[in-house]
Image (tube, rainbow, N blue to C red):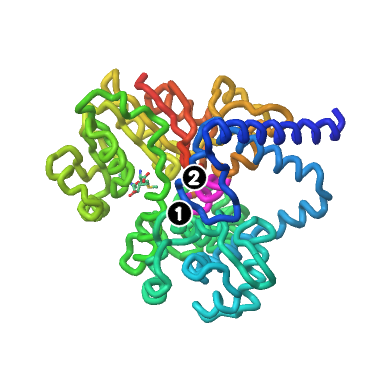
Amino acid sequence: MSSISDLRKLSNIISNAVDRIEDICAAKGLEFPSLDKSFSRGDEAAREIPEVYEATNLITSAAGQLAAMARSPAMMMIDVSFKCFQGTALKIAWEADAAEYLRAHGPSHVSDIAKHRDISANKLGRILRLLATTSYVFREVSPDIFANNRLSSLLDSGSSLDNLRSNRNAKYNGLPAYLDLNLEFGAQAAKQLLQTLFDPSTAHSLNFEESALLASYGTKGSLFDYIKRPENERHEKRFDAATASLTAISSFDWARLAKGSIVVDVGGGKGSQSLILARNFPHLCLVIQERDVVIPDAEKYWVEEGMADVVESGRAKLQVHDFFTPQPVKDAAVFYVRGVLLDWPDEYCTTILRNLHDAATPETQLVLQDIITFHACPDPAAEGYKEGLLSVPPEPILANWGVANSYPYYLDMALLNAFHTRSRTVAEYTELLRKGGWKVEDLRHGSLPLAVANQTIIAVPI
Ligand SMILES: C[S@@+](CC[C@H](N)C(=O)[O-])C[C@H]1O[C@@H](n2cnc3c(N)ncnc32)[C@H](O)[C@@H]1O
């Protein structure tokens, strides 16, 4: 097939998807959000319609592939080799409070933005220009005058500039906390990761104590032990805010569970997901299980969130439980395991899953929210799944949807970096679950709106 015909197919995919978005928006009386305006949840209404979301994925995948085909290969590769500077630039903009400054003052000269943290206007201007040019983050509205746009406004913690001057932890709120976690852990260990992969003593290791990130911090134990140390309060605050920002509860039909059903949130952190379940589904009872060091923080968190009465009434229980030991709850409707298996090597996961299996009734469902990756070539294990980024895309889009589905692949690198672990393919999850006594029933894509949500596997006991 000539490459011209592939260019044409990709451009048709884009053009048809734009037509579909236009029709749906017109029928519903909605505007498709502009990139030039700051982010607001209300303006995302169009993109939250599943057909529109699917069309945006088609556009993203096809446009990325089209650019790779159309552009000079040398320029494309030089771009890839310089990608690390995008992360560095984003981190500098984050530390400069550029998004908060532009929210407070509107379009501003870079010398004013730079004064807030007393840094060089010239250097910051070049940083913001790089971001505006290569990733469409910020907008240069006239020479050296920058403004927030839909992307850069997601760096905004919502804190006032005065507050940020005296309390840098005020940055850790919602998505900006997650972005900073990725930026800092990635940059911290970038060199060490290379060394870890090639050093014969660690090249084949799966020991989480030997991860590149922990080595670069010069520490042993797990990352959870590290961030719990008193001197690492900043890390802990950011980690908690980051995990809480990634809500993904909607890809399971919680409403259909019978009244009084018990949902056990295994390794549930402070219970940020269970808290959303408790608020939205009053018919459910929640048990949040965590390590002993986390439960006191969880108790405080539920009080701070105005949900103390739910704990006092017993509808939500905060329970110390080590998931490597036998599961005490024997009548759960759902074992909810989110962001846990991706932290552990296979043999540890099998123990966690076996403990759940041994406590399950024949009706218990396992709701697993983790990161699933597909091969970048046609993947037989992916066949049969019809939903969004889990389905097979139209040709010639890459079989795993390419850039529209980049998140699980980046997260896989983050896992390798921090925990020495990995995301898993559908075939790997199926096999892991089988060893743990579970059979995969369904696979669903994570919820909107920010599309940083995890994918969901629903399994039943064998
Ligand atoms: C990535 S966090 C996910 C937290 C939560 N499920 C969520 O999605 O927000 C993993 C959690 O596993 C907990 N954890 C680690 N080892 C554990 C163990 N042996 N028993 C119970 N929880 C554990 C950690 O304290 C941490 O809160």
Range of residues picked out in magenta: 410-419
Q: Which residue does the numbered mark 2 point to in the structure image?
A: 450
Would you say the residues marked 1 and 2 are in contact, meaning their CB atoms lie under 8 Å apart?
Answer: yes
The residue lying at 61 percent from left, 73 percent from top is 124
Please state, as top left, top right, bottom left or bottom right, where the C terminus lies in the image.
Answer: top left
Q: Nearer the viewer, residue 266 or 359?
A: 266
Q: Which percent across, then down, holds residue 289?
A: 26, 42
Indicate whether 417 appears above or below 54: below
- Given the image, on which type of amino acid does mark 1 rest? Leu
Classified by dominant secondary structure, the portion drawn in magenta counts as helix
Q: Is residue 14 left or right of residue 265?
A: right
Q: Which percent across, then down, holds residue 445?
A: 49, 32
Question: CB of residue at label 2: within 8 Å of ligand 1?
Answer: no
- Given the image, on which type of amino acid does mark 2 rest? Leu
Q: Nearer the viewer, residue 294 or 308?
A: 308
Dividing the picture into quadrants, the one containing residue 172 is bottom left
Asked if residue 274 is among those painted magenta in the image, a careful observer would answer no
Please state, as top left, top right, bottom left or bottom right, where the N terminus lies in the image.
Answer: top right
The residue lying at 50 percent from left, 46 percent from top is 43
What is the number of the mark on residue 175? 1
Indicate whether 124 appears above or below 393: below
Indicate whether 109 appears above or below 90: below
Q: Nearer the viewer, residue 123 or 449?
A: 449
Q: CA distance from mark 1 to mark 2?
A: 9 Å
